[in-house]
Image (cartoon, helix red, strand yellow):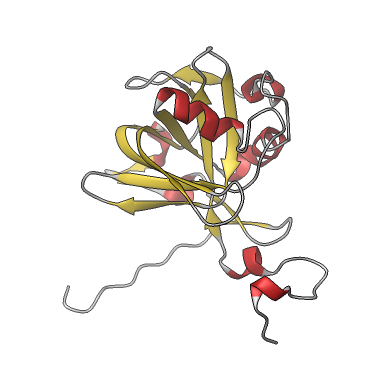
Amino acid sequence: MFYEPRQGHGLPHNPFNAIVTPRPIGWISTRGADGSENLAPYSFFNAVAYVPPQVMFASTSTKPDREGTKDSVANIRETGVFCVNIVEFAARDAMNMSSGPWPREVDEFDRAGIAREECRMIAASRVADAPAALECRMTQIVTLEGVANFLVLGEVVGVHLREDCLVDGVFDITRFRPLARCGYRDYAVVEEVFSLKRPGE
């Protein structure tokens, strides 16, 4: 099968987001200028640079009460900061609950029963028991082609690591089983890890 996206695929569901998988989930927490809190998962998320450490996530739809974007991007535009919380398998139901199309005044921490802690370097909350959390200062918001497609880039200015995930000085992902997004309504969990030595090492 071959298709041109601009002409449609003719399938019951769009296969595009099932092709690039699995994708890490950035559970983005933000606080608006009015003090309102937001927590939402984004599967268009990744790390993009080491020095300084930088991450990105993309928001690709709108809410009626946010004038062409969603709560996360709107809050980051106002404050210039956000926190990326890493999602473990044990938090799958809470993460899913926080993905709902709730009105801007709804606090997803409360809605999903998620414990929070204040970030140290930025004015936002973080998921208290997340395996890791990255406090970020926004560096760019890039408008992408299409309607309501925004790429948010941020520099990581603070890192929280849960103590039980550190083993002999290594952040061990097998201790918390990272959750990843696949296509459609499907997710995956990392349960097996192996190492490869690069040529020349």
Above or below: residue 176 compared with residue 37: below
Residue 91 in picture, x, y percent from top left: 62, 38
Residue 190 in view of the camera: no
Nearer the observer, 148 or 59: 148
Above or below: residue 198 compared with residue 133: below
Q: Is residue 139 left or right of residue 141?
A: left
Above or below: residue 116 compared with residue 4: above
Residue 56 in picture, x, y percent from top left: 42, 47
State the image quarter where residue 80 is shown: top left
Nearer the observer, 81 or 18: 81
Q: Residue at x 49, y 16 (%)?
A: 33
Q: Residue at x 66, y 40 (%)?
A: 62
Residue 70 in view of the camera: yes
Residue 97 in picture, x, y percent from top left: 72, 34
Q: Which residue occupies the extreme bottom position in the image?
A: 1
Residue 25 in picture, x, y percent from top left: 54, 48
Q: Residue at x 32, y 22 (%)?
A: 121
Above or below: residue 58 compared with residue 9: above
Q: Residue at x 69, y 20 (%)?
A: 106
Q: Which residue occupies the extreme left position in the image?
A: 200
Q: Quadrant of the C terminus?
A: bottom left
State the image quarter where residue 93 is shown: top right
Label total for image:
0
Q: Which residue occupies the extreme top position in the image?
A: 34
